[in-house]
Image (cartoon, helix red, strand yellow):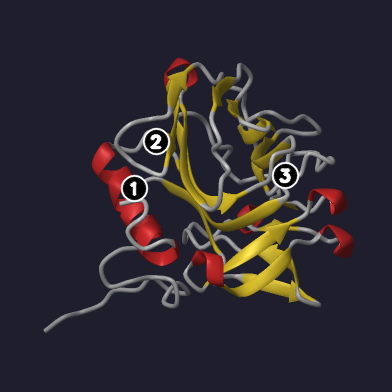
């Protein structure tokens, strides 16, 4: 007899075999088909699915003009749901202050894309400051992690949908692009403290907001092992780009 265990309130997002919170240390899990509140086709709230029950981890946007558009079925992402952010409207979703402030080491794994202007996929919030725990495109071909120091790599990293893993661990930070085995770059990204997260833009929500899409966003309170990263990349590949990132 097979028994499928689903945590309370999580049944629609959990598989009998794998879901991101099954890896220890999951702090935040946002997926395009889960926890979405719509306002005339735009997303006003995206609820955390980690099961930690901290409502301040939900990312929200009260201003209608700054709410990302919702794509319930996105053909470019294997028919899965995505959110479209627009830099011109400064669309960004921000959390409240988490009950427990996340501290490095931290790993953020996400699926999305952007254009070639300066723009943030995400940023840690700490008051009115930004660049606290950020992953952003600094120019046409320059991708950067920044938690106070800045770790940059020159690559066409936003060419279509991507699966990226950003590891924030001070001097031994790294960025993985579309594979879980070899980082695209490693080095010092700094260790600035954060109290929450902004998704699809920077903390203050300036014109450096994302001009692109996010499908899934997962955050852990540890440096994931290679097998754990591989498990996530296989899961995300199966959902959004079969065979592309495994």
Where does the image place residue 209, in percent across and percent down from the top left?
A: 76, 44
Residue sitting at 77 percent across and 29 percent down?
A: 129
Contact, mark 1 vs mark 3 (Cβ under 8 Å) = no
Quadrant of res 201: top right
Q: Which residue is mark 2?
A: 222
Residue sitting at 70 percent across and 65 percent down?
A: 45
Residue sitting at 62 percent across and 53 percent down?
A: 57
Label 1 – label 3 distance at C-alpha: 27 Å
The quadrant in which the N terminus is found is: bottom left
Q: Residue furthest bottom?
A: 1
Judged by depth in the image, the label closer to the viewer, 3 or 2, is 3
Q: Give the answer, above or below, for where 121 lies relative to 16.
A: above
Quadrant of res 4: bottom left
Sequence-wise first label, 3 or 2: 3
Quadrant of res 149: top right
Sequence-wise first label, 1 or 2: 1
Relative placement, left or right, of 57 versus 224 is right
Where does the image place residue 118, in percent across and percent down from the top left?
A: 74, 35
Q: Which residue is mark 3?
A: 201
Label 3 – label 2 distance at C-alpha: 23 Å
Disc 2 is placed on an element classified as loop
Q: Residues within 10 Å of mark 3 (few under 14, many from 20)?
A: many
Contact, mark 3 vs mark 2 (Cβ under 8 Å) = no
Judged by depth in the image, the label closer to the viewer, 1 or 3, is 3
Q: Residues within 10 Å of mark 2 (few under 14, many from 20)?
A: some
Q: Which residue is mark 1?
A: 24
182, 130: nearer the viewer: 182
């Amino acid at each position: 007899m097979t028994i499928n265990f689903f945590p309370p309130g999580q049944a629609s997002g959990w598989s009998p075999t794998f879901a991101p919170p099954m890896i220890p240390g999951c702090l935040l899990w946002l997926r395009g088909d889960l926890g979405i509140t719509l306002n005339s086709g735009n997303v006003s709230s995206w609820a955390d699915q980690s099961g930690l029950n901290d409502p301040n981890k939900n990312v929200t946007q009260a201003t209608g003009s700054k709410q990302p558009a919702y794509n319930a079925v996105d053909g470019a992402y294997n028919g899965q749901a995505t959110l479209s952010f627009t830099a011109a409207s400064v669309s960004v979703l921000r959390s409240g202050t988490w009950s427990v402030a996340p501290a490095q080491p931290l790993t953020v794994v996400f699926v999305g894309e952007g254009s070639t202007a300066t723009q943030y996929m995400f940023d840690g919030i700490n008051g009115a400051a930004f660049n606290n725990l950020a992953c952003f495109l600094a120019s046409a071909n320059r991708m950067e992690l920044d938690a106070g120091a800045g770790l940059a790599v020159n690559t066409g990293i936003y060419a279509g949908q991507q699966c990226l893993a950003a590891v924030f661990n001070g001097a031994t930070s790294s960025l993985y692009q579309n594979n879980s085995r070899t980082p695209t770059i490693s080095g010092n990204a700094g260790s600035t403290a954060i109290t929450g997260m902004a998704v699809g833009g920077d903390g203050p929500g300036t014109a450096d907001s994302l001009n692109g899409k996010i499908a899934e966003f997962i955050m852990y309170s540890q440096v994931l092992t290679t097998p754990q990263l591989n498990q996530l990349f296989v899961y995300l590949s199966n959902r959004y780009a079969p065979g592309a990132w495994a």
